[in-house]
Image (cartoon, rainbow, N blue to C red):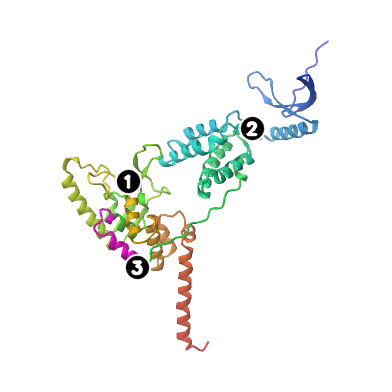
Amino acid sequence: MARRKMARAANGAGSIRKKSQIKNGKTYTYYEGRCTIGYDPLTGKQIQKTITGKTEREVQQKLSKMQMDVDEGAYIEPSKQTLGEWLDMWLETYVAGSAKPYTEDSYRAVCENHIKPLLGNIKLAALSVPQIQQLYNKLVREKGLSAKTVKNIHGVLHRALNKAVQIGGIRHNPADACELPKVYQKEIVPLEEPQITAFLKAIRGHKYEHIYQVTLFTGLRQGEVLGLTWDCVDFEHYTLYINKQLQKSKKAGGAYQLVPTKNGKARLLTVAPSAMAVLRRQKSQQAQMQLLAGPVWENKDNLVFTNEQGGHLTHVTVYKNFKTIVHSLGLDTRFHDLRHTYAVSALESGDTIKTVQDNLGHASAAFTLNIYSHTTQKMRRESADRMESFIKSVSGGHL
């Protein structure tokens, strides 16, 4: 009699069996379900996955979910990688070479110092929202990290897990549902006019006088000032082409290098004649430095601001000298506050938010408006006061 050929089971068809296991002389009962997730393209044999649980209902629920995913083509084979292994692969495959060197170093430091020590051994497919949330809570409560730092750590982990989702390693990103500590924006404290006058007087004759003046008069970031090159200074048209910044690698003993600006975009900045006059004096001063240095002079990047041998300046040296000066004036001003001072002065002088945004190199006018909202509120009040004066003048005070 001819043997009847069994019909080929559809993907997702599953069954549940009650099973028992003897362990240490005691019998344990559990339930096991099997689900067909596809067929081997070479042998044609079924590829089955096994699901176990304490109750038949638990297994049935898991099996139904898997069957639904298989039927909809949404089933993803659980990754056998640990989170630590995936982070290493993500850094080498998707970050190295595509991100700025400083960004790549930052990502690596975050993974090695904060994520992998606590979560690195967990299977990528098993990583849960509570586990990630506990990491963030611990970083704040036990490690004492700031809310902003934890937010940055979350950004790295979230980006790595998003890529795992995109390539089918996991179904969803568990970092999506985590609660982050609230980041409070630091109060902007620009220098007032009397303080600006005192500061300009205090830096007179200082070896970094021109750096501080250019920063105050243009609003450039510290890295952009230190990375400014002479080919980007147009004395004829009073413009600066800001297309790079000087940045130090976060690796131990990392070198300084010129990299793209913070947002990766170049901008053309039209500056005041006084700022250009400072740069002309800097060019003359640098020529004198080159004569004194003689054959040891080497300014291979054509930097505007250098040390006595033509090499780049370091952020920390410029910053420490700045702090010494402001402390002598009884101020607790940060170097970045020179940039804030420029922005506030520009707004109060009548520049539009859009103009200030473009000059500062912010990604959007909304970002600029958010940072300097207190200044725009003051401008609105002054506008209302001017309108009140106008109304009184035209109405003869009879309203």
Q: Quadrant of the N terminus?
A: top right
Distance from Cα at disc 1 to Cα at disc 2: 49 Å
Residue at x-position 44% and y-position 42%: 103
Q: Residue furthest right?
A: 1
Q: Residue at x 57, y 46 (%)?
A: 141
Inspect the image, locate mark 2, and give the three-letter code of the amino acid beneath it: Ile
Q: Would residue 242 be seen by someone viewing this image from the given angle?
A: no
Q: Residues within 10 Å of mark 2 (few under 14, many from 20)?
A: some
Kind of residue indicated by mark 1: Thr
Q: Tell us which disc is closer to us: 1 or 2.
A: 1
N-terminal-most mark, 1 or 2 = 2
Residue 76, numbered label: 2
Vertically, is 259 above or below 326?
A: above
Mark 3 secondary-structure assignment: helix
Above or below — where is 319 with respect to 216?
A: above
**What stretch of residues is rendered in magenta?**
193-210
* C-beta proximity under 8 Å, tags 1 and 2: no
